[in-house]
Image (tube, rainbow, N blue to C red):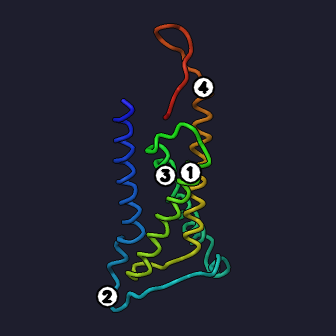
Amino acid sequence: MKSKRRIIFIFIFIVYILSVIYITILSKYSFQLPQDQRYPNLTITLFSELNAQSRTYLLKNYLGNVVLFLPFSILFILIKKQSTFKVRTILLTLASGIIFSLFIETIQYYTGYGIFDINDLILNTLGTLIGILLLRILKFYISSKRIPDKHHGSSGRINIS
């Protein structure tokens, strides 16, 4: 049963990864620019658009980058079948999120289908970290709940791993 669950998580993770690539690189707006108007663009100033952009844009951009990477860490940990949150698991998950974000930003830079933005890298990493924390909180909450066992009248624990 656990192997079926893991296969489902792997499938969801692959769909998630492809969706993120589509959203960040292959979305419709990317192909509207003619090839000669696409060029590498780089933003390395931390949060430079804070004063220049509207609050709606900032909320959409910043919150969007964080939320986009929440599922990464949750699915990554579930696939790794880690029932405990060891430092090694957290660091591996965080490093994997950073590498995936760096991959996206690098592809955007070299294809001209977006901007390599250091802020996106930071916000995606924050989303990965928040996803780790949310999964930890959820796991703690679920493991502390007891459900009655229908056959024996005793209580059992819910296990998400």
Q: Give the CA separation, mark 1 to mark 2.
A: 37 Å
Measured along the vertical axis of the image, is residue 156 above or below residue 39? above
Q: Position of residue 78 (x, y in %)?
A: 47, 43
Q: Give the CA separation, mark 2 to mark 3.
A: 33 Å
Helix, strand or loop under label 2 = helix
Mark toward the start of the polypeptide (3 vs 4): 3
Kindly indicate whether the residue at mark 2 contacts the one at mark 1 (C-beta within 8 angstroms): no
Helix, strand or loop under label 3 = helix
Q: Position of residue 80 (x, y in %)?
A: 46, 44
Looking at the rendering, in which quadrant would you find the N terminus?
A: top left
Mark 2: amino acid: Gln
Return the residue found at the far bottom.
36
Mark toward the start of the polypeptide (2 vs 4): 2
Q: Which residue is mark 2?
A: 35
Measured along the vertical axis of the image, is residue 126 above or below residue 73? below
| Residue 23 horizontal side relative to residue 69, left or right | left
Q: Which residue is mark 3?
A: 71
In the image, which disc is placed on residue 145?
A: 4
Q: Quadrant of residue 58?
A: bottom right
Closest to the observer, 122 or 93: 93
